[in-house]
Image (spheres, coloured by chain):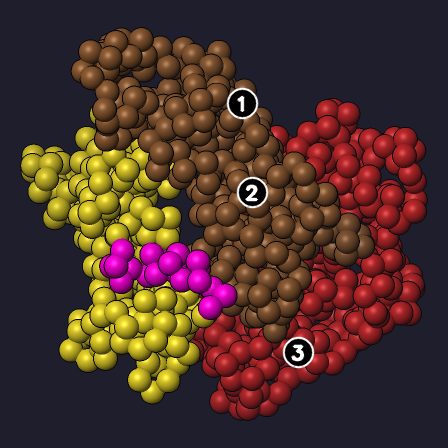
Chain colours: A red, B brown, C yellow
Amino acid sequence: MNAAAREALTVSGLTVAYRSDAGWLPVVEEASFTVREGEVLGLAGESGCGKTTVAYAMLGERRPGSRVMAGTVLLESQDVLAMPERDLQLLRGARISMVPQNPATSLTPTMICGRQVMEVLEYHRIAAGTAARRRALELLEEVGLRDAPGAFARYPHQMSGGQQQRVVIAMALAARPRVVVLDEPTTGLDVTTQWRILRLLRQLRDRFGTAMLYVSHDLAALAQICDRIAVMYAGRIVEVAATRVLFAAPRHPYTRALLAAVPSLDRPPEAEPALKGSLRRDELPPGCPFAPRCAFALPACAVTPQALVAIGVGHEAACWRWRELDGGLRALAHAD
Amino acid sequence: MLRLVVTRTAFALVSLVIVSALIFWCVEWLPGDAASRILGRDATPEVLALLRHKLHLDLPGPVRYLQWLGGAVRGDFGTSLAANQPVLDYVWSRAANTTELAGFVLLLYTPLSIGLGIWTAVSRGRAVDHVASILVILGMCVPEFVVGIVLIVIFAMTLHWFPPLALIDRAHSIGSVLSMLFLPAMTLTIAMTAYAVRMMRENLIEVLDSGYVQMARLKGLPRWRVLVRHALHSALGPALNVTALNIAWLMGGIIVVETVFSFPGLGRLLIDAIDLKDVPVVLAVSLLLTVVYIFCNLLADIAVLLLNPKLRHAG
Amino acid sequence: MLGFFMKLSPAARIAAVILLVYVAVALSGPLWAPYSFNAVLTGGPFEPPSTAHLLGTDNLGRDVLSRVVYGSRPVLAMALSATGLATLVGAALALPLVLQGGLADEIGMRILEILASVPPLVLALLLISGLGNGNILIVLAVAFLFAPRIARVVRAAAMAVVVEDYVTAALTRGEAMWSIAVREMLPNVAGTILVEFAIRCGFAVVFIGALGFLGFGAAPPAPEWGLMINEGRANINASLWPVLAPAAAMAVLVVAINLFTEGLARAIGDAPGTAP
């Protein structure tokens, strides 16, 4: 990836809280990252880590009961979070678009698929009438639907999950946005279909240079498409690195644990401890949020806040023990 | 899909035939038969027997039912005992009045229920929604005859905006007919709208929370487009369903409301005919109301089928 | 009992208290009502409210308050007995049909659907004008109209239960139909039946009131709210009290039943599977 490419999306200090009985509970804290033009950035993490909240915030969409407490999301030097509703309307679908998790519930059941694609073209004044129809057919072909005219006229429920997701991707790409946010776009699809959708996304990125923020818990899927990956834990980004670097030399204990949990043929089963316990939002320590589940945590970890620090070229991690863990990690683990 | 509609329609027709027999059988129980009612108390047994024979009253029940049903299918409901004219002409003019009333009701009901349904759904949790939900409960619970009388007290007796009774006939001008129709129409509208708003609101809230409505917003569509084309469209089936059920309910509602306002319609005619033991009229009106009732229930079923594409393309 | 009360929403709790007041008034009314319900000329006709007549008097100089108080008795008694009978019959029809399944269930359901496809008020008027308008006949007529509609609801709930393992187990054990229906199924559909009973009670109050209003209920001088509203309507220009008092009594009762039912449904829904 060309590191000098311009930034398509810049997020800094994003903090989102949800209303709870005990007041506003932060779900995303101080998240900062950039997506460069033509780049695919992965956002990895367990369910409940706040990655979907981040994804929707990119489009200025507030999930019910949530509030943006701080931070900016810059898209072409405009802050999406500070935009009035009218400007958001012009932005969404045109300059940044979304591919949500479940294609079956993302398409309006009472409308044929072609019209749902045409809408994007019409309301963003890209094409109208027969031109819009023609363009929608092209788009449906572009996303690899073999019988585009047939797909155009079908209702969502008459299609398979994979076909539905292709229609959603066609909608997302219709206005040639600079950034596409994908929230678990292959979850719920069978493995073959997942693989085909991932291949399609790669092709589309190569062809149109669209920047993508790809949110997933599935590291195997992220490995296939992402240039860089940011790992999120309990609302905080704990490590960012180029995909190859992250897989070869993970520095944060959480990333290590996640990778250890990925089944692989070319890697022997590791002796490294798998992730223990589960994410408990109500029991986060004031220091490193991962400390309660970390195999290498010292007593001080739980009370010392951790921030992302550069540990290599384009590689950041939020663990103060990264250096000592780096070499002697395995020895340490066995000494426990 | 077509097969489903055909089966439902066929079943509705079978129900109608069976129910008409039930109605015929009930009316048979009305004390005294037609002959003794026509001739009065002083009739000699011979004359009575003669008239009974002439009116086919000496035939067994099932045979008379089939004769009546045969006539009804051809539009011949016999002669009214009280008015001494063909039942159909008699019923027709009353049915026209009731149709006017029902038309007026739908004119008020449709915009009110759609408007309030949408308004309460999009402003859920806010003050408007809370006030509306109290009004909806009142509208659904308080009996029509109570609502009607309260409207009379407020709008006829206190404010003098509308007449308290709706004794319309052909001689009145359109303006005065409308002004007389307003209170009865409003009474029926309140009950129907309450049910519809409740249904619409619940349904629409579910749709507004759905992934596809969020997706439509994230596509950058304007609010009205999201609401009209993506949300309302999905809520249309349930709305038509509740409307059809409401019209079916009207077949009982008019009986009460026409009594409150002394309105010369079908409902009032049924009560009067029962009082006068005018059997052919009772049968004709009951059958007419039942036909509409069954037909509207059928439409309610079909509305759900037709406007849900998942069901539309199945079977 | 008290624990269940605390599970209700505030609105449902208020409604429950109002319903208890109605029941108390119906039970104790004759002990403290200032006049008898048909004592004429206890004052002049159409007197406005005064200390002697808290809600005024009607055209015959009868005390409106006393008539409204006495009127709570037939309303509650008839609505409860008609709905209770209909629920009993409806459940007794639905449960065996569901257990039997197959053709019997199909035919039974069709018959219930046909019975439910007559406009209820029309059929009630015909039945009552044929049978007579005694209170017992009215109760029977209303029960006859409600039973098939209740049976459909109970059937739908029972369909979900009949596939459960404990029913299958009882069937394999060769237990008698009625014993499975009562011991295995009834406790699991009891919540649905209770809520349906409560909903129908509200309908029954309105329905019986409408019959009285149309002149198909109790005959004068019975202190029946629907009848009182109709009688008062003729003299509405002379005094509003004889109309508005029974109308308000009826409206508050029906709203209270409805609010209580909603709270009941929600409280039962919170703890699925537990019979209240």
Q: Chain of mark 2?
A: B
Q: Which residue is mark 2?
A: B243
- Label annotation for residue A29: 3
Q: Residue at x 91, y 70 (%)?
A: A77
Residue A324 pos. (x, y %): 61, 81
Residue C246 figure quarter: bottom left
Q: Chain of mark 3?
A: A
Asked whether residue B250 is drawn in magenta, I would say: no
Question: What segment carries the magenta color?
Answer: C220-238
Q: Which residue is mark 1?
A: B89
Q: Residue at x 26, y 52 (%)?
A: C219
Quadrant (top left/top right/bottom left/bottom right) for the N terminus of chain A: bottom right
Whole-number angstrom distance, CA of label 3 to CA of label 2: 49 Å
- Label annotation for residue A241: none
Q: Is there one chain holding both mark 3 and mark 2? A: no
Query: Mark 2: which amino acid?
Result: Thr
Query: Mark 1: which amino acid?
Result: Asp
Label 3's element?
strand
Q: Residue at x 20, y 50 (%)?
A: C135
Are dots 3 and 2 in contact, CB under 8 Å? no
Residue A280 pos. (x, y %): 48, 74
Residue C79 pos. (x, y %): 26, 55
